[in-house]
Image: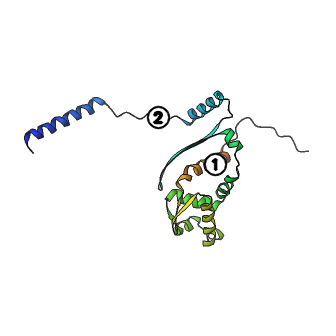
């Protein structure tokens, strides 16, 4: 490399270093709106449009199976007028401890083999037999919560990760949060 070319490279590096020094510390990206901010925005929108309101859920998860981003919003009028029957399979699947254990293993580990999933059921008894395992796996596949990539190799359906986590978070909140509002006096039974 000749000296003229080397000198030019040194000048360019010096200019870049000057830019970095004068720019200061890197800028932080703006904070995303808080969920309370989103909630207030939804309320104002409903008041403005004289509507019942909106129900929504969002989530961002970086898990072994990959990154999952999801945002969904439904008007309350649409949700209340929709046939809820299609939700039954999903809610039934989530109402089973062995199936929740299988989903937990898939969400924590990403893809799992049949043997991994059998182990996640743990212990002895009906829930650990191969027949019971396949029964639960078929129900989860039928509800479109898991996918079988190849024989004996399963994963959480990527499009179901955040919705299922939102359902579980809401159910846990309902089960463990103290009730809201003042206590209600119930009438004495006669």
Residue with the most extreme top position: 48
Q: Which residue is nearer to you in this view: 158 or 174?
A: 158
Query: Which of the numbered marks, if any, corresponds to residue 153?
Result: none
Callout 2: few (<14), some (14-19), or many (20+) C-alpha neighbours within 10 Å?
few
Residue with the most extreme left position: 3
Position above or below: 25 against 62: above
Relative to 24, 47 lies left or right: right
Circle 2: element type: loop
- At which x and y percent is residue 137? 60, 65
- At which x and y percent is residue 173? 64, 45
Circle 1: element type: helix
**The C terminus - image quarter:** top right
Quarter residue 19 falls in: top left
Relative to 21, 145 lies left or right: right
Name the N-terminal-most of marks 1 and 2: 2
In three-dimensional space, the C-alpha distance between marks 1 and 2, rounded to whole angstroms, equals 27 Å
Give the colour scheme shown: rainbow
- At which x and y percent is residue 154? 53, 63
**Residue at figure coordinates x 61%, y 58% from the top left:** 100
**Residue at figure coordinates x 65%, y 48% from the top left:** 171
Callout 1: few (<14), some (14-19), or many (20+) C-alpha neighbours within 10 Å?
few
Query: Which of the numbered marks, if any, corresponds to residue 31?
Result: 2
Verify CB contact (< 8 Å) between mark 1 and mark 2: no
Q: Which residue is nearer to you in this view: 56 or 171?
A: 56
**The N terminus - image quarter:** top left
Disc 1 target residue? 172
Tally the numbered discs: 2
Position above or below: 189 against 130: above
Quarter residue 17 falls in: top left
- At which x and y percent is residue 39? 60, 34
Position above or below: 23 against 144: above
């Amino acid at each position: 490399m000749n000296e003229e070319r080397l000198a030019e490279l040194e000048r360019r590096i010096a200019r870049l270093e000057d830019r970095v020094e004068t720019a200061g510390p890197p800028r932080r990206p703006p904070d995303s709106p808080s969920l309370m901010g989103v909630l207030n925005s939804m309320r104002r929108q409903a008041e403005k449009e004289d509507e019942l309101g909106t129900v929504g859920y969002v989530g961002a998860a970086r898990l072994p199976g990959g990154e999952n981003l999801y945002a969904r919003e439904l008007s309350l009028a649409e949700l209340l007028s929709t046939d809820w029957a299609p939700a039954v399979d999903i809610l039934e699947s989530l109402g089973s401890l062995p199936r929740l254990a299988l989903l937990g293993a898939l969400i924590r580990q990403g893809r799992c083999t049949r043997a991994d999933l059998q182990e996640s059921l743990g212990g002895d008894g009906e829930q650990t037999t191969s027949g019971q395992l396949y029964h639960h796996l078929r129900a989860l596949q039928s509800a479109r919560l898991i996918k079988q990539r190849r024989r004996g190799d399963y994963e959480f359906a990527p499009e179901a990760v955040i919705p299922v986590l939102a359902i579980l978070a809401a159910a846990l909140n309902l089960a463990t949060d103290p009730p809201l509002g003042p206590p209600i006096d119930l009438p004495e039974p006669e």
